[in-house]
Image: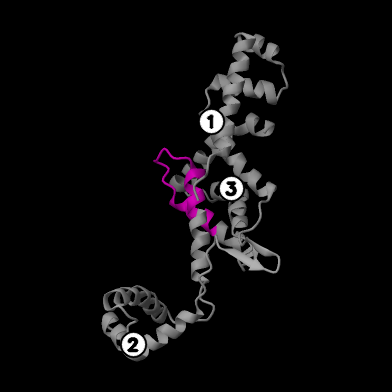
Amino acid sequence: MTDIISSTPPAVDDDRELLIRWHVHRDVLAREELVARMLPLARSLARRYAGKGEPLDDLEQVACVGLLKAIDRFDVGREVKFSTFAVPTIAGELKRHFRDRGWMLRVPRDVQELSGRLTGVRETLTNDLGRAPTVTELAQATNADEEQVLEALSAGDAYRTLSLDEPLVDGAGAHEAIGGPDEGFEQAEHRVVLRDGLVELAPRERLILRLRYVEGLTQREIAGEVGISQMHVSRLLRRSVDELRERLTMPQAA
């Protein structure tokens, strides 16, 4: 925490500066520096989806693609922190990866699309007719011929729909399919959230935190340095730490 406190405000400013340099001046080096800075966050998000049958290396590559898209799509004119925009963008890329990889066999795109339409049509017809629809009825409802419907229904068996939140069951019982928590990866996310939180504190409160946790001054010494009472220093420290702790425990967008 101490190194974050001492460097946080400039780092956040640097994020926006790097984004401006890339979007306005097309500075490739600025883009690469921002990628390197946000890479731990991307890897942390990839780790959340480990254990779903996809190699972690592949997931990290997908997360990096999401990070690049977040950088390129970010609107520097909006008053939004980049990390707030990047997290859902990267998570969306990871979910899209699993959705696209859901087909275990190579199935033509038009057959995939018809299979998707049939799911809704079959449910609607079943409700309307009070029974399962025939192939002929499905073909008429989707403007396809019966052979195409049969092919799409068969292709549906090649699709696996494992939820990212679904538990796996084995001899040892049920367990979460999602990868277990890794303190190192979670720490990367916490650093981003904490860094953003520090920027929103008043300058005096950031100074007090730096004097206490970076330079190791006592509350009495801080009071003399800042020019307020020791009791006031204690209140400001407690309030600032509580605010940062609340930020770290709040659910983040995904």
Per the rendered image, the range of residues in magenta is 65-89
Residue 110 to residue 12: above or below: below
Image coords of residue 146 (percent x, y)? 33, 90
Q: Residues within 10 Å of mark 3 (few under 14, many from 20)?
A: many
Q: Residue flagged by tag 3: what amino acid is it?
A: Met
Q: Which residue is mark 2?
A: 135
Q: Which residue is mark 1?
A: 199
Q: Is residue 153 visible?
A: yes
Q: Nearer the viewer, residue 206 or 152?
A: 152
In the picture as drawn, the residue positioned furthest to the front comes out as 130
Q: Residue flagged by tag 1: what amino acid is it?
A: Val
Real-space CA distance between mark 2 and mark 3, rounded to the nearest whole angstrom? 51 Å
Real-space CA distance between mark 1 and mark 3, rounded to the nearest whole angstrom? 17 Å
Q: Residues within 10 Å of mark 1 (few under 14, many from 20)?
A: some
Name which of mark 1 and mark 3 comes first in the sequence: 3
Q: Residue flagged by tag 2: what amino acid is it?
A: Val
**What residue is shown at x 38% (from left), y 76% (from top)?**
113
Name which of mark 2 and mark 3 comes first in the sequence: 3
